[in-house]
Image (cartoon, rainbow, N blue to C red):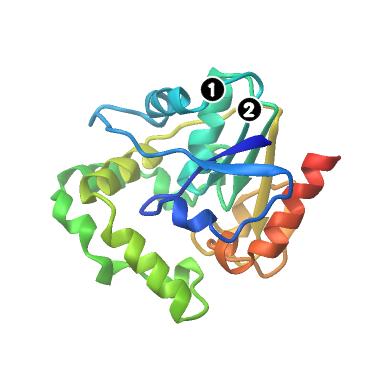
């Protein structure tokens, strides 16, 4: 069975992929590894490639994982790179995320600040019910606050303008984290939020399967 290597989003883990079902494919989560404070998304992506063996793999990335997948695609040759609720280039990110003062603010805040789940707006992320909210809060609680701090800074410092031709970008029209007005995806999911991979998993699965069988 062919594998799809899945990279989760910031403050998330492999639990976000549990509802995806791609017939004929095994979903293999790529684990977060130790980061260096000086790591960029590019250097961290290189570390993740050690978990993606073989030739022409299929890579799937959610949000932060999508940006890392873009960088992975510059390091290894992938057959397909699926971005879900993510950005191909820094120009697709909210403009506030490109402000130097924000990077300085993130660097100066203590790591513990990023561990407060009460600061997370689950509705803005796309939670539609108690199950969604519990999943988001549980994953955030299980994530190292230091990793959240580093990854936020790395995203703010991501000045990417290019992406591999193998990229297939799937985005929701109701995404409020990476607003639809900023992106130019290959496929829109009408009404899809930032966590449509969870609460619109059947539709997202069908879209991915369609591209794989094309």
**Residue 170 appears at what percent x and percent y?**
67, 50
Residue at point 33%, 65% (across, down): 138
- Mark 1 Cα-neighbour bin, 10 Å: few <14, some 14–19, many ≥20: few
Residue 155's place in the image compared with 12, above or below, is above
In the picture, measured across the screen, residue 203 lies left or right of residue 44, that is: right
Does residue 48 appear anywhere in the picture?
yes
Q: Which residue is mark 2?
A: 57
In the picture, measured across the screen, residue 195 lies left or right of residue 110, that is: right
Q: Residue furthest bottom?
A: 130
- Is the Cβ of the residue at disc 1 closer than 8 Å to that at disc 2? yes
Mark number, residue 53: 1
Residue at point 69%, 63% (across, down): 202
Q: Give residue 201's quadrant in the image.
A: bottom right
Disc 1, SS? loop
Q: Give residue 174's quadrant in the image.
A: bottom right
Disc 2, SS? loop
Residue at point 26%, 46% (across, down): 149
- Mark 2 Cα-neighbour bin, 10 Å: few <14, some 14–19, many ≥20: some
In the picture, measured across the screen, residue 181 lies left or right of residue 90, that is: right
**Residue 95 appears at what percent x and percent y?**
47, 50
Q: Nearer the viewer, residue 39 or 95?
A: 39
Q: Quadrant of the C terminus?
A: top right
Q: Give residue 101's quadrant in the image.
A: top left
**Residue 21 appears at what percent x and percent y?**
66, 55
Does residue 100 appear anywhere in the picture?
no
In the picture, measured across the screen, residue 36 lies left or right of residue 44, that is: left
Q: Quadrant of the N terminus?
A: top right
Residue 162's place in the image compared with 12, above or below, is above
Q: CA distance from mark 1 to mark 2?
A: 8 Å
Residue 66's place in the image compared with 17, above or below, is above
**Residue 42 appears at what percent x and percent y?**
43, 26
């Amino acid at each position: 069975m062919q594998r799809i290597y899945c990279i989760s989003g910031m403050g998330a883990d492999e639990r976000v992929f549990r509802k995806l079902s791609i017939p004929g494919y095994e979903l293999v989560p790529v684990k977060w590894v130790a980061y260096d404070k000086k790591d960029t998304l590019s250097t961290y992506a290189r570390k993740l490639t050690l978990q993606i063996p073989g030739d022409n793999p299929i890579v799937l990335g959610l949000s932060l994982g999508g940006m890392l997948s873009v960088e992975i695609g510059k390091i290894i040759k992938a057959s397909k790179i699926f971005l879900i609720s993510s950005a191909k280039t820094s120009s697709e990110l909210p403009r506030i995320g490109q402000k130097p003062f924000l990077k300085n603010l993130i660097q100066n805040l203590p790591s513990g600040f990023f561990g407060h789940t009460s600061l997370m707006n689950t509705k803005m992320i796309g939670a539609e019910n108690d199950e969604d909210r519990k999943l988001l809060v549980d994953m955030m609680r299980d994530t190292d606050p230091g990793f959240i701090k580093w990854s936020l800074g790395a995203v703010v410092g991501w000045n990417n303008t290019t992406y591999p031709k193998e990229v297939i970008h799937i985005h929701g029209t109701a995404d409020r984290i990476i607003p639809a007005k900023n992106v130019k995806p290959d496929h829109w999911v009408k009404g899809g939020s930032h966590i449509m991979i969870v609460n619109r998993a059947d539709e997202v699965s069908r879209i991915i399967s369609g591209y794989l069988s094309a």
